Image (spheres, grey):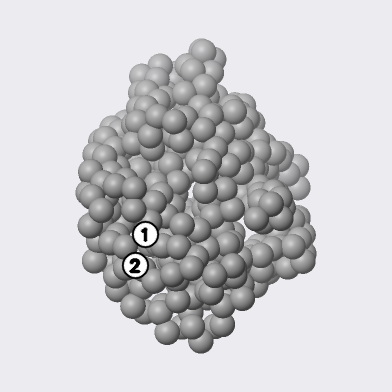
C-alpha cells in the first residue's frame, strides 16, 4: 500500500503537467478571440462561434472520453489527447476559412484538450489520495493557474510580435511535448478505492468488486470483465439525481463564466485599457489562483464542498460586479480587485464539483461520471461565448451579459446544495450498486 501511495505522487506530477497544458489552451482563448476577429474581420457573434462549437464538441465527447478512460486507461488516452492537440493546432494555423477553424480548432484540438482536462484528472488522481482528495486536486489544479500565468501573456506577446498562425504552431508542438511522452511512459490506472457513504457503510470494496480480486488494481482486471459491467454501470448512474445536479451546477456556472471570460480582453480594450495590460491582468488571475486553488481544495476537505463552492462563486460574482461598475480604462484598482477576487476563486467549479463526485462515486465508475459533468461544462462553454457575443452585437456593451452571468452563477450554487441534500441518503448509491 505504501508503494501505491508513493506512486500517487508520480500521478500527481503528471496531472499537474496535464493541467498546465489545459490551462494554456483554455486561458489563451481571450487573446485568440481578438486575433481571429481582427484577422478575419468577423463580428463578435461569428468569432465567438469558434469557441462555442468547441464547447459543444467538449460536451458531446466528454461522456465518451470518460468511458474510454475507464476502459483503456490514462496511459493510452492522455498521449492520444496530446497528439490531437498537436494536429489541431498545426492544421488550424493554416486555416483561411471559418469552417476550417470549426473543424480543426473547435473539434480536433478540443477533443484533445478534453482528454487531458480537469475532469479526467479528477477521475485519475482522486483514488490515489482518498483521505485528502480535495487538497490534492487543488494542488494539481495550480497547474491550470500556472498555464494561465505563463501562456496567456506569452500568447499575446507572440501574436503581437509574429502572428497568431506562428503562435499556434509553437504552442501545438510545446503542448504535445509536455503531455505525450511522460504520460505514455509513467501513467497508470488508479487503484480501486472504497467509497464510504455518510451513513458509514461502504459502497464498494476491493474484495467485493467483480472487476478485481482482492489485492489487485484495476490495471489487472481483464477488458472483458470491464466490458460486461460497463453498460449496466452507466444505466445505474443515470438513474440517480445527485449526478445530474452536479452536471447542472457545472453547466450553469460555466455558462456564466464564459458569457464573460472569452470577452474579457475585448471588454478591457473597449473600456480603454491597453491590450497587453488586459492580457496580463487575466494572466494575473491565474497567478493568484496558484494560491487560491489548493486553499479551496484543502478547505473543502474541512468545511465541506458546498460551503467552499458558495463562497468561491460569491467572490466571482463580486469580481464581475467590480469590473462592470468601476472598470473605466483609467483606474487600475478595480482591475486589481477583480484579479484578487477571481484569482482566489479561480477554477473552483471544476475542483469542488470533481471532489464532490469522487465523494459519491466509486473509482471504477468515476471516469464515466466525470464525463457527464464535463458534458455540462462543454454545453456551458458552447452557449456562454455565443450568447455573450450576440448580446454585445445587440447592446454595444457587455452589461446585460455580465448581469446574466451573475444570475446563472446563483442558480449553480443552488444546484450544488441540492446535489448534497439528495446525495446525503444511503439510498443514493446503495451498497454494491456500481459493482
- In the picture, which quadrant includes the N terminus? bottom right
Q: Residue at x 52, y 43 (%)?
A: 131
In this rendering, is residue 421 above or below 2? above
User: Which residue bears the numbered disc 2?
Assistant: 432
Q: Is residue 18 above or below residue 321?
A: below
Q: x, y (%) of residue 188?
A: 66, 65
Is residue 317 visible to the viewer in this orientation of the structure? no
- Taking the spot 45% from the left edge, 63% from the top edge, the residue there is 205
Left or right of 388? Residue 346 is: right
**Dot 1 corresponds to which residue?**
203
Left or right: 221, with 50 as reference point:
right
Q: Earlier in the sequence, mark 1 or mark 2?
A: 1
Determine crowd level at label 2: few under 14, some 14-19, many 20+ residues with C-alpha closer than 10 A. Answer: few
Secondary structure at numbered mark 2: loop
Is 248 placed above or below 214 here?
above
Residue 110: quadrant of the picture: bottom right
Graded by Cα atoms within 10 Å as few (under 14), some (14 to 19) or many (20 or more), the crowding at tag 1 reads: many
> Do the CB atoms of the residues marked 1 and 2 lie less than 8 Å apart?
yes
**Where is residue 59 drawn, in percent x and y?**
40, 63
Amino acid at each position: 500500500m505504501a508503494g501505491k501511495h508513493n506512486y500517487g505522487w508520480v500521478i500527481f506530477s503528471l496531472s499537474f503537467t496535464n493541467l498546465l497544458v489545459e490551462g494554456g489552451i483554455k486561458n489563451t482563448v481571450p487573446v485568440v478571440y481578438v486575433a481571429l476577429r481582427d484577422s478575419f474581420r468577423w463580428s463578435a457573434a461569428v468569432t465567438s462561434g469558434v469557441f462555442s462549437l468547441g464547447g459543444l464538441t467538449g460536451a458531446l465527447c466528454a461522456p465518451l472520453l470518460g468511458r474510454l478512460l475507464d476502459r483503456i486507461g490514462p496511459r493510452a488516452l492522455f498521449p492520444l489527447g496530446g497528439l490531437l492537440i498537436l494536429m489541431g493546432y498545426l492544421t488550424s494555423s493554416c486555416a483561411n476559412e471559418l469552417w476550417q477553424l470549426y473543424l480543426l480548432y473547435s473539434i480536433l484540438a478540443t477533443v484533445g484538450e478534453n482528454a487531458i482536462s480537469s475532469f479526467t484528472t479528477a477521475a485519475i488522481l482522486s483514488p490515489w489520495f482518498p483521505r485528502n482528495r480535495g487538497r490534492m486536486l487543488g494542488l494539481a489544479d495550480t497547474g491550470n493557474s500556472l498555464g494561465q500565468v505563463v501562456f496567456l501573456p506569452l500568447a499575446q506577446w507572440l501574436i503581437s510580435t509574429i502572428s497568431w498562425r506562428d503562435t499556434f504552431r509553437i504552442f501545438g508542438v510545446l503542448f504535445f511535448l509536455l503531455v505525450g511522452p511522460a504520460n505514455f511512459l509513467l501513467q497508470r490506472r488508479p487503484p480501486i478505492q472504497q467509497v464510504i457513504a455518510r451513513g458509514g457503510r461502504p459502497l464498494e470494496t476491493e474484495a467485493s468488486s467483480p472487476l478485481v480480486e482482492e489485492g489487485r488494481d484495476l490495471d489487472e482486471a481483464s477488458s472483458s470483465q470491464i466490458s460486461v459491467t460497463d453498460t449496466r454501470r452507466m444505466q445505474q448512474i443515470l438513474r440517480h439525481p445527485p449526478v445530474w445536479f452536479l452536471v447542472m451546477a457545472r453547466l450553469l456556472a460555466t455558462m456564466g463564466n464564459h458569457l464573460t471570460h472569452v470577452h474579457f480582453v475585448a471588454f478591457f480594450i473597449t473600456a480603454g485599457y491597453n491590450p497587453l495590460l488586459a492580457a496580463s491582468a487575466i494572466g494575473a488571475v491565474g497567478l493568484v489562483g496558484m494560491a487560491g486553488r489548493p486553499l479551496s481544495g484543502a478547505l473543502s476537505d474541512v468545511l465541506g464542498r458546498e460551503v467552499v463552492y458558495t463562497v468561491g462563486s460569491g467572490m466571482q460574482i463580486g469580481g464581475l460586479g467590480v469590473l462592470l461598475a468601476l472598470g473605466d480604462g483609467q483606474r487600475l484598482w478595480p482591475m486589481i480587485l477583480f484579479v484578487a477576487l477571481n484569482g482566489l476563486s479561480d477554477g473552483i467549479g471544476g475542483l469542488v464539483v470533481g471532489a464532490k463526485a469522487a465523494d459519491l462515486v466509486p473509482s471504477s465508475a468515476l471516469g464515466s461520471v466525470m464525463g457527464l459533468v464535463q458534458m455540462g461544462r462543454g454545453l456551458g462553454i458552447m452557449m456562454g461565448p455565443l450568447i455573450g457575443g450576440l448580446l454585445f452585437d445587440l447592446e454595444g456593451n457587455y452589461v446585460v451579459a455580465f448581469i446574466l452571468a451573475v444570475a446563472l452563477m446563483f442558480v449553480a450554487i443552488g444546484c450544488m446544495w441540492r446535489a448534497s441534500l439528495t446525495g446525503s441518503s444511503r439510498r443514493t448509491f446503495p451498497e454494491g450498486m456500481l459493482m
